[in-house]
């Protein structure tokens, strides 16, 4: 049996057509059910659909053999216990530093609201900028407006969310896309099955 963990939401919409092209299908009945473990058109493959940030955790601990998650989430997780094997080139966006104006970024201690703690700390440490990170779980754009932070670090796709909140992206931390990850032990114990699926997915890219 092979279990694949998929990220809910925006990534899922682009993942399902890719998997279908690779030969793996999940029926609408399964997708619309309240079940947490979904059947596929293969008896040997099950799918779980979970929060994006939980995907690397399930894969790391072997609760899922493979997973599809954004690079943003994988950078935060750190990659322990899993191999990142394929860049799927879907759900592309950028991890950016945004503020209402550039002057806001020139502080002795820059206050940054984000859920991307690790990436933010690495980026500003490399620049030698002293920062204070304020961990938020959503609605980051609100933080500069209410004086909680000087700027934010968040994912930007079209830039519409930033624009609607009077923010401008000034610095790029990372280009982001979804990646296929595999549990490091499963990669050895289930290698034939996993390698076959990787080949199918590669061909469908
Ligand atoms: P946009 O307004 O198109 O720039 O999208 C920005 C909003 O969508 C932010 O709240 C992001 O956190 C979220 N977002 C954009 N791209 C992605 C992605 N590839 N994966 C997850 N969230 C994303």
Image: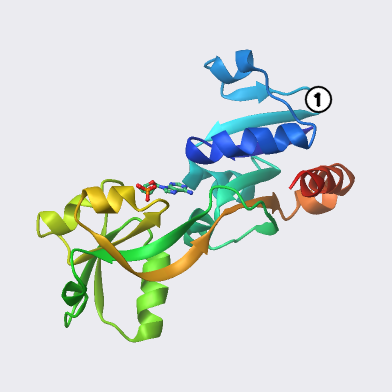
Residue at x 49% of width, y 39% of height: 10
Q: Is residue 11 left or right of residue 23?
A: left
The yes-or-no answer for disc 1 within 8 Å of ligand 1 is: no
Q: Is residue 110 left or right of residue 7?
A: left
The spot of residue 148 in percent (x, y) is: 14, 59
Outermost residue to the left: 146
Structural crowding at the residue carrying mark 1, measured as other residues with C-alpha within 10 Å and reported as few (<14), some (14–19) or many (≥20) = few
The spot of residue 117 in percent (x, y) is: 36, 63
Residue at x 17% of width, y 67% of height: 150
Image color mode: rainbow
Is residue 149 in sight in this rendering? yes
Is residue 140 in sight in this rendering? no
Which image quarter holds the N terminus?
A: top right
Residue 13's quadrant in the figure? top right
Residue at x 81% of width, y 23% of height: 43
Q: Is residue 142 left or right of residue 157?
A: left
Residue at x 61% of width, y 31% of height: 48
The spot of residue 24 in percent (x, y) is: 76, 31
Decide which of 47, 23 is in the foreground and name it. Answer: 23
Count of labels in the image:
1
Outermost residue to the right: 192
Q: Which residue is mark 1?
A: 42
The spot of residue 3 in percent (x, y) is: 70, 35
State the SS at label 1: loop
On screen, residue 202 above or below 168 = above
């Amino acid at each position: 049996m092979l279990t694949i963990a998929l990220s809910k939401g925006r990534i899922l919409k682009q993942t399902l057509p890719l998997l279908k092209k690779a030969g793996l299908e999940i029926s609408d009945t399964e997708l619309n059910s309240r079940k947490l473990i979904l059947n596929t058109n293969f008896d040997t493959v099950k799918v779980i659909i979970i929060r994006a940030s939980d995907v690397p955790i399930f894969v790391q601990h072997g609760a899922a053999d493979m997973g599809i998650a954004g690079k943003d989430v994988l950078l935060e997780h750190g990659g322990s216990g899993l191999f990142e094997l394929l860049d799927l080139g879907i759900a592309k966006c950028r991890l950016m530093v945004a503020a209402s104006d550039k002057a806001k970024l020139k502080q002795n201690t820059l206050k940054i609201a984000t859920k991307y703690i690790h990436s933010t700390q690495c980026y500003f440490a490399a620049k030698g900028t002293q920062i204070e990170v304020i961990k938020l779980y959503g609605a980051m754009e609100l933080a500069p407006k209410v004086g909680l932070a000087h700027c934010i670090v968040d994912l930007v796709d079209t830039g519409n969310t930033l624009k609607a909140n009077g923010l401008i992206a000034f610095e790029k931390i990372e280009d982001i896309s979804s990646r296929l990850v595999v549990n490091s032990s499963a990669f050895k114990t289930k290698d034939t099955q996993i390698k076959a699926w990787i080949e199918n997915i590669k061909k469908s890219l």
